[in-house]
Image: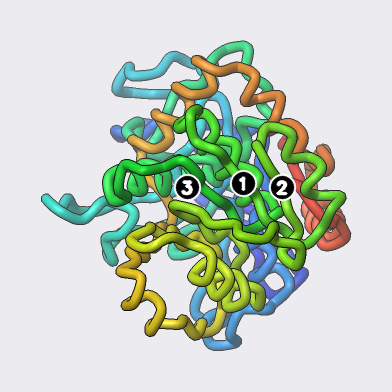
Amino acid sequence: MINTVYRLVAPRRFEVAFEDINLFGENAIVRPTYLSICNADMRYYLGTRDAKVLAEKLPMALIHEGVGEVYLDPTGTFKTGDKVVMVPNAPVEKDEYIAENYLRSSKFCGSSMDGFLQEFVEISPKRLVKLPDNIDMTVAAFTEIVSVSVHAISRFDKIAHARRDTISVWGDGNLGYITSLFLKYHFPKSKIVVFGTSSDKLADFTFADETHLVNEVPDGFTTDHAFECVGGNGSPIAIEQIIGLIKPEGTISILGVSEYPVPINTRMILEKGLRVFGSSRSGVKDFAKTVDMYEKHPEIIDYLGNLISSVNTVRTTTDIKNAFEKDTQKSFGKTIMKWEE
């Protein structure tokens, strides 16, 4: 079967390519229906990645956040028409100690292999997680970034000590919103406090116990543990503030992505005996756990729906470009592409 692939060939320029899909192998064929644009996609689209990196990676189909409907599954694991979320991480080996999303040999859609911006996606059934039939697919489209938060929280639960009276999140963007929301559901007895730079954005964190501007920290405030979800140029400031406010032997989870090295106050990390760990991407188990949370707590979908900035019907490369351009103009939230034939 001939498949249409929409690849970014240069910053702000998409082109169509045609490739064969094997209908008689062991992989499933999925028709993408809703795709979500991530900041990583935008760095490729805008050409803000290092020129050497762009030269190595392009041309490439973008998008690693997406859902679709099963067209064919020769293994019989899924039925035609099943709604599924596609896991972008593609490991080629197993390790007793290292998770699939940290193996250096693993491939990742929209980074080291073509992403989901295709008419059909050929993918292992093991890389699919079934979605509830009645789920809002515009929200399910960005399950990948949600699973990253779920992954980080799961790791935190294993690493951090058991005193969790107060857990704080730095960052009022998408990742901060998702992480603090799921922290509230994972640790309902903990006080979840969010720090940000925008009062308007913090007003949307209605599920949090407290929200504060980073320059208006209450006198005497301390936290048992913290999650850094800022990234970029704000990472150094956020991490420095966290180290200053966290209690001794607390745990700091780093989630924000920065293009450049971030200086960290190691003296205070040593003095306080802090644990600092990073989390990136996620695996099939994290996706399954995320979908399970959707089913157990359907109101989570309503909260996540607040993150949708726009839904854009996409049929052509011009439509794709328009959706990406719209994403450059948003101040908050997720840009969704409704992928139609």
What residue type is disc 1 on? Val
Labels 3 and 2: the sequence-earlier one? 3
Labels 2 and 1: the sequence-earlier one: 1
Check residue 211 in the rendering and tell me which mark sits there, or answer none.
2
Q: Can you give x and y, in whole percent of width and height, for residue 171 in the image?
A: 65, 57
Residue 227 in sight: yes
Residue 217, quarter of the rendered image: bottom right
Q: Position of residue 174 (x, y in %)?
A: 67, 49
Label 1, residues with CA under 10 Å away: few <14, some 14-19, many ≥20: many
Q: Secondary structure at mark 2?
A: strand
Above or below residue 8? Residue 319 is: above
Pick the front one: 332 or 102: 332
The Cα atoms of the two marked residues, 2 and 1, are separated by 6 Å
Residue 81 position by quadrant: top right
Q: Residue at x 65, y 25 (%)?
A: 301
Front in this rendered view, residue 70 or 325: 325
Q: Which mark is residue 148?
A: 3
In the displayed structure, 82 sits above or below 253; it is above
Residue 186: x, y in percent? 45, 31
Classify 269 as above or below 192: below
Q: Residue at x 61, y 40 (%)?
A: 142
